[in-house]
Image (cartoon, rainbow, N blue to C red):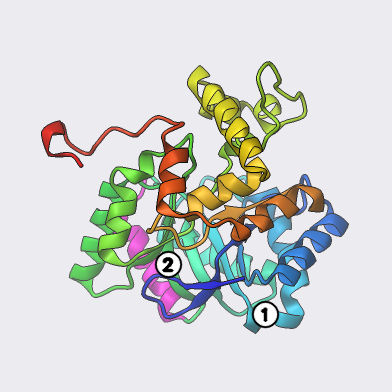
Amino acid sequence: MKTNLLGRTGIHVSELCYGTMSFGGDADEAMSAKLYAACRDAGVNFFDCANVYSDGRAEEILGDLMAHERDDLVVTSKVFGSMGPGPNDVGLSRRNIAQSIEASLKRMKTDRLDVYFIHKIDPATPMDETLRGLEDVVRSGKVLHIGASNHAAWQIALALGISAREGWSRFDVLQPMYSLVKRQAETEILPLAQDQNLAVIPYSPAGGGLLSGKFRPGVKPEGARLATDARYAERYGESWVYEVAEKFTAFADKMGVHPMSLAVAWTAGHPAVTAPIIGARNTDQLVASLKSVEIDMNEDLRAEIAALSRKPAPANDRLEEQD
């Protein structure tokens, strides 16, 4: 597996990142170990986690699995979600950031995280307060680089400006949603990342499983996340995304490749993307995602696949100036 530079950090990461959201949930401890081993055998050195995944259990499992080779890996986690019953056990206050990093490091049995993400915007905490809290954990050596997940481009730009003004560590990594059926990041987030040399590790490259090949004309599998998780059902609730999924699956079948492989390869093919985040409930699901690196996603093929979906609206209404 090839490696890519993680933005301007100087760190080399595998061209795929494994997301551990299933650890301790859809994947029990034994299956998590198999998934981890399969990733390592394939050359993955990049693992993404969050404190809220399985209420902290994912961090614990990942910590145990990586203990013997911690220095060979690039590891992330996130802060925001509620990890306790109290009103201050959630959010992006300096207080919660300081407490959350200690808890994450303890669960993961490591002395530092390579990247620490704020999981989403906290409307109760001003951005400068959050960034100062992140600067504190960077200066302490507990975090090497910081990142933002689920942010709008203007929020990222605001944060970059504050960090530059104050001389604080700036966001080096972005984690937006991005797939053939969720292309809004193309409008402003990905161009911003390219301009500012920010790494991008997008999640849900297969659209929550929509582009995995399970959704074919007249077929919506009952056990799929889109059928069992209300959040995903709403996120992908518009009828056109299922039409795209059907066309995409037929396209992959014609190419003779697994739809999941093609979906991940398409996301990875955007020039701003550093490493798509892949995930799986079992090793059978994982194989197709890992094989995405075998697909030659050239510009012509990527454009042909993009034409199956809706192009996102441009950043402004001067349509005569759009490419």
In the displayed structure, would residue 319 be above or below residue 45?
above
Name the element at disc 2.
strand
Q: 79 and 174: which one is in front? A: 174
Q: Is residue 318 found inside the magenta-colored segment of the image?
A: no
Q: Tell me the amino acid under the disc marked 2.
A: Ile
Callout 1: SS: helix
How far from the left and from the top, in percent, is residue 49? 61, 59
The residue lying at 77 percent from left, 59 percent from top is 35
Q: Which residue is mark 1?
A: 70
Residue 178 visible in the snapshot? yes
- In the rendered image, the vertical position of residue 18 relative to residue 316, given as above or below: below
* Up-down relation of residue 139 to residue 43 (above or below): below
Which residue is at the far right?
30
User: Residue at 23% across / 62% down in the picture?
Assistant: 162
Q: Position of residue 78 (x, y in %)?
A: 53, 58
Q: Nearer the viewer, residue 99 or 134?
A: 134
CA neighbours of label 2 inside 10 A, class few (<14), some (14 to 19), many (20+): many
Read off the magenta span: 124-140
Q: Position of residue 224 (x, y in %)?
A: 72, 31
Which of the 4 quarters of the picture holds residue 160? bottom left
- Residue linked to disc 2: 146
Q: What residue is rendered at 66% in x and 36% in y? A: 253
Q: Left or right: 142 with respect to 67?
A: left
Q: Main secondary structure of the magenta part?
A: helix
- Residue 131, magenta (yes or no): yes
Q: Quadrant of the C terminus?
A: top left
10 Å crowding of disc 1: few (<14), some (14-19), many (20+): some
Q: Amino acid at mark 1?
A: Arg
